Image (cartoon, rainbow, N blue to C red):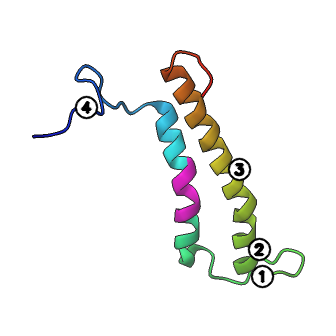
Amino acid sequence: MPDTSATPPDRRPVVTLSRVVIALCLVAPFVAMLWVGSYAKIEPTFIGIPFFYWYQMAWVPISAALTSTAYVLVRREKRARKGGGSA
C-alpha cells in the first residue's frame, strides 16, 4: 500500500515556472561542462589563455550565480507555501 502521509490527497506536486527556472539553473552548468566537444578547441584565446581553459574557468562564477539564484527561488517558494512566514 503506498504511503500517502507525505502529501495530502487534495494537493499534488505542481510544475511551476519557478521550479522550471530552478531546474534550468541547476542543469545548465552540467550540460555546459559535460558537452566537451563544444569547447575542446584553442581559439579564441583570451589574454593568451586557450578557449578550452578560460571557458571552464568562466563557468565557475556563472555556476555560483546560477546556484544562488536557484537557492533564492527555492526559499521564496517555501515561504509562499508556508503562507508568508520566514523559512
Task: Name the residue carrying label 4.
Answer: 5
User: Which kind of residue does numbered mark 1 sit on?
Assistant: Pro
Q: Is residue 3 left or right of residue 58?
A: left
- State which quadrant residue 48 falls in: bottom right
User: Which kind of residue does numbered mark 3 sit on?
Assistant: Ala
Name the residue nearer the viewer: 9 or 30.
9
Comes first in the chain, label 3 or label 2: 2
Task: Name the residue carrying label 1.
Answer: 50
Looking at the rendered structure, the secondary structure element under dot 1 is loop
Residue 65 - label = 3
Q: Main secondary structure of the magenta part?
A: helix
- Calculate the distance from the C-alpha at mark 3 to the C-alpha at mark 2: 17 Å
Measured from the top left, where is residue 66 in percent x and y? 65, 49
Contact, CB < 8 Å: mark 2 with mark 1? Answer: yes
Is 28 inside the magenta-drawn segment? Answer: yes
For label 1, the crowd category at 10 Å Cα-Cα, with few meaning under 14, some 14 to 19 and many 20 or more, is: some
Comes first in the chain, label 3 or label 1: 1
- Calculate the distance from the C-alpha at mark 2 to the C-alpha at mark 1: 7 Å
For label 3, the crowd category at 10 Å Cα-Cα, with few meaning under 14, some 14 to 19 and many 20 or more, is: few
